[in-house]
């Protein structure tokens, strides 16, 4: 498998974490997003990364679609909880990512008006009630959000300490080698 990747890209981070959690080996082709090769558009017409390419020539863009694909093609270990209600809530987190985190994260990064603190309070409140985003088990919802939380802290200088449940969630996640590797990569990127 080949991952067309960019170290800085949090959407790529979702896929890197998913691949690592599934224990899958892959080759990385690092894409310079400021000088994208023209052939990238043949793999993904939007010219965005991540894109996953399988040995048999199957090419798939879009981080959420790739994660769901990996889950179906390599079911072990499972990414979704056994409880259908928790699965549904996990999917809702992913579906609402832009309003629940992404929009205000990117607004802050652009220097525009941002309510990232409110979004972080909301995440914190959700995680006070349960250890993981979709409920009792770690899964795709957590993988879908954690790259931005890591980058908010290391790249945007957001102090996560006031958000106790969110910080506890992050600590728990960082015990996982796939997330710890991503933390190292994010820290190495600097601001
Ligand atoms: N919806 C896409 C978003 C991917 C995305 O925005 N990737 C960024 C890098 S973090 C990119 O390729 N940007 C280049 C561009 O917007 O032209 C996904 O989930 O994979």
Image (spheres, helix red, strand yellow):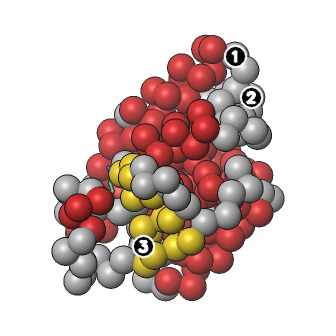
* Viewport quadrant of the N terminus: bottom right
Left or right of 182? Residue 47 is: left
Residue that protrudes farthest toward the right in the picture: 175
Disc 1 or 3, which lies upstream in sequence? Answer: 3
Residue depth check, mark 1 versus mark 3: number of the one nearer the observer: 3
Q: Is residue 47 left or right of residue 161?
A: left
The earlier-in-sequence mark between 1 and 2 is 1
Say which element carries label 3.
loop
**Ligand 1 falls in quadrant:** bottom left
Does the residue tagged 3 have its C-beta within 8 Å of any atom of ligand 1?
Answer: yes
The residue carrying mark 2 is 136
Query: How far is disc 1 from disc 3 in space, using C-alphas?
Result: 34 Å
Q: Front-most of 146 and 31?
A: 31
Q: What residue did someone put label 3 on?
A: 6
Q: Are marks 1 and 2 in contact (CB under 8 Å)?
A: yes
For label 2, the SS is loop
């Amino acid at each position: 498998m080949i991952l067309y990747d960019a170290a800085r890209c949090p959407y790529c981070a979702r896929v890197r974490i998913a691949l690592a959690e599934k224990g899958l080996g892959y080759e990385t082709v690092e894409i310079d997003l400021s000088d994208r090769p023209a052939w990238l558009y043949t793999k993904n017409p939007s010219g965005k990364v991540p894109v996953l390419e399988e040995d048999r020539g199957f090419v798939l863009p879009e981080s959420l679609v790739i994660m769901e694909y990996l889950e179906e093609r390599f079911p072990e270990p499972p990414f979704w909880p056994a409880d259908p209600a928790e699965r549904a809530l996990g999917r809702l987190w992913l579906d609402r990512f832009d309003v629940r985190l992404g929009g205000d994260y990117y607004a802050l990064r652009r220097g525009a008006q941002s309510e990232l603190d409110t979004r972080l309070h909301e995440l914190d409140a959700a995680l006070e009630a349960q250890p993981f985003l979709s409920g009792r088990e770690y899964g795709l919802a957590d993988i879908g959000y954690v790259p931005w939380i890591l980058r908010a802290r290391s790249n945007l200088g957001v102090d996560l300490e006031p958000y106790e449940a969110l910080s506890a969630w992050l600590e728990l996640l960082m015990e996982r080698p796939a997330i710890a590797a991503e933390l190292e990569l994010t820290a190495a990127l600097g601001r």
